[in-house]
Each structure stands twice: as C-alpha cells, then as structure tokens.
Image: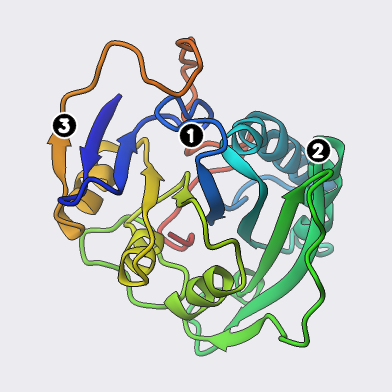
Amino acid sequence: MTVYESRDGRSRLLRSDARHLEGVGSGEVGVIVTSPPYLVRGRGLASADRYARRLAVEFGREWRRVLAPHGDCWLVLGDRHDGREWMGIDGLLTRWMRRTGWTLQAKGCWAQVGSRERWDNRINHVLRFRKTGAHPVRPRSTTLAWMLPLPRSHTDSRWDATPKAVIRKVLAVSARRGAVLDPFIGAGTVALVAARLGRAWIGVERDPHMAALVARRLRMRRVRTPARASSGRGPHRRTSSGSRRIATGSSRSRSRRR
C-alpha cells in the first residue's frame, strides 16, 4: 500500500483496494461520500442485483468498521435501462444495505442536463445511509434534487466527476466530526471540496495513474509506511479482481462519475 499525506498531515491518500481499508482506523470517519463504479454492462435484474449485493457486502463491511457510530454514508449511483426496463439500482442497493446493517435516511437525485450521453445514463441516485442502531436523521424540508450538467473532468482523469454542488450539499447536512472518506476517489473531486471546507479527508484509489493524479492535484507527499497499518486489522489476502470491478459484467468507462 502506497500512502500520500497532505502538507499539514491531516489528510491522506491510500493507493489500495477499497475492500480492505487497512490504513483507516475503526470509527475514524465521520462521513463517507463516494460514487462507486457504475454498472455499465450486463443485462437483466439478476446482473444488477449481483452488483448491488457485492457493493453492500464486500465494500460495505469495511465502511461499517471505519464509520463513526452516528456517521453518514452517501452513495451516488447511476441507474440504467437494459432495453426492456429500468433496473431501479437504488432499490436493489437499499435492500442489500439493509440486510448488511444499514438504514436508508434520505434519497435524492441528480439528473444530467445538456448531456451528450445516452438517455439511459443521465439519472443518478443520491442515497444517505446510517448504520442500524444509529440516531435517525431528522427530516428536513431541503430537497436533495439537482438538474446539473456533467462537470468537466481533469484532463488527465479517466473518469467523469460528480458535481461539486452535490458534494458540498451532502457534506453540509452530514456529521461534522471525523474525516471525510471517499473509497473510490478517482480524480479527487470529493477531496478538493472537503479540503476547501477545512475538512480532513481520506481517499482510496487502486489505479496508480489516478492515485498519482490526486496526489498532484492536492499537492501531497509520499510517506513511508510501516509493515502493518495501524487500523487495528491484520493483513488481508489480496484477490486478483480489483476494487474498480464491482460485479461480474460491470466496469468503469469514461462516462462514469468520479
């Protein structure tokens, strides 16, 4: 695992697999804001359900460990149409998140306007979860809905970005204590917003090219790491499939959000 650190030492970037957050301590994170790799291949509800299950089970386990007891987990997910019907990925993921110890606290939507993408790639769900047993979020009159164009990515990025307005809003209504974690940090949009708000952040990125890009954008320095991270967890065996491949038949394309 390669580790980069901000100049003030408050924030860090881990080039690692997001399924094994060995460099993050239990309860260290106040809010998770991330846009996982979208389901862009595969047909039928069975394929979408496998995607949702793997995201909730394989990645959600570590999210539960590192998130503070009353922290928030925000997921930005794109829905898609398989030629016959909409997958309803928000409902599928919510079902699996509930099975694995989460409660859905809020739902929002970002609809792309002026998009050059296909019509079935323009709906993005914004979901807020808390761990089962945590204090429920008090309902607010604020509507979590945006009609925004797809923001321009960094020229060296392989992924598209989530609008900063969406990230700023979800951080504004979330827990203020603890670091902001993006386990699929991509080009670092969440980190940029968190840093400008004065929040400490932690990013995880498996792709060496993208991790180096984030380190440059945030002016981070590479640091030496001990043989075993201080997260309270022992070493994990790495699998051959990476965190950029959530489910059979799913992958990242240039049109996915980061």
Residue type indicated by callout 2: Gly
**What residue lies at 46% left-to-right and 50% top-to-bottom?**
182
Q: Choose top left, top right, bottom left or bottom right for residue 153.
A: bottom left
- How far apart, in angstroms, are the residues tagged by discs 2 and 3? 35 Å
Q: Choose top left, top right, bottom left or bottom right for residue 235.
A: top left
Coordinates of residue 63 in the picture (x, y in percent):
61, 38
| Residue 176 left/right relative to 192 | right
| Residue 246 left/right relative to 138 | left
What residue sits right under mark 3 in the picture? 223
Q: Is residue 88 visible?
A: no
**What residue lies at 86% left-to-right and 37% top-to-bottom?**
99
In the rendered view, would you say 130 is above or below 140? above
How busy is the neighbourhood of tag 2: few (under 14 within 10 Å), some, or many (20 plus)?
some
Residue type indicated by callout 1: Ala
Residue in the foreground of this view, choosing between 175 and 79: 175
Q: Nearer the viewer, mark 1 or mark 2?
A: 2
Q: Choose top left, top right, bottom left or bottom right for residue 51.
A: top right
What residue sits right under mark 2 in the picture? 101
Coordinates of residue 252 in the picture (x, y in percent):
47, 48
Residue type indicated by callout 3: Val
The image's mark for residue 18 is 1
| Residue 58 left/right relative to 115 | right
| Residue 99 left/right relative to 67 | right
Q: Nearer the viewer, mark 1 or mark 3?
A: 3
In the rendered view, would you say 24 is above or below 232? below
- How far apart, in angstroms, are the residues tagged by discs 1 and 2? 19 Å
Coordinates of residue 93 in the picture (x, y in percent):
77, 49
Coordinates of residue 159 in the picture (x, y in percent):
38, 58
Q: Is residue 93 visible?
A: yes
The image's mark for residue 209 is none
In the rendered view, would you say 24 is above or below 49? above
Query: Tag 3's secondary structure?
Result: strand
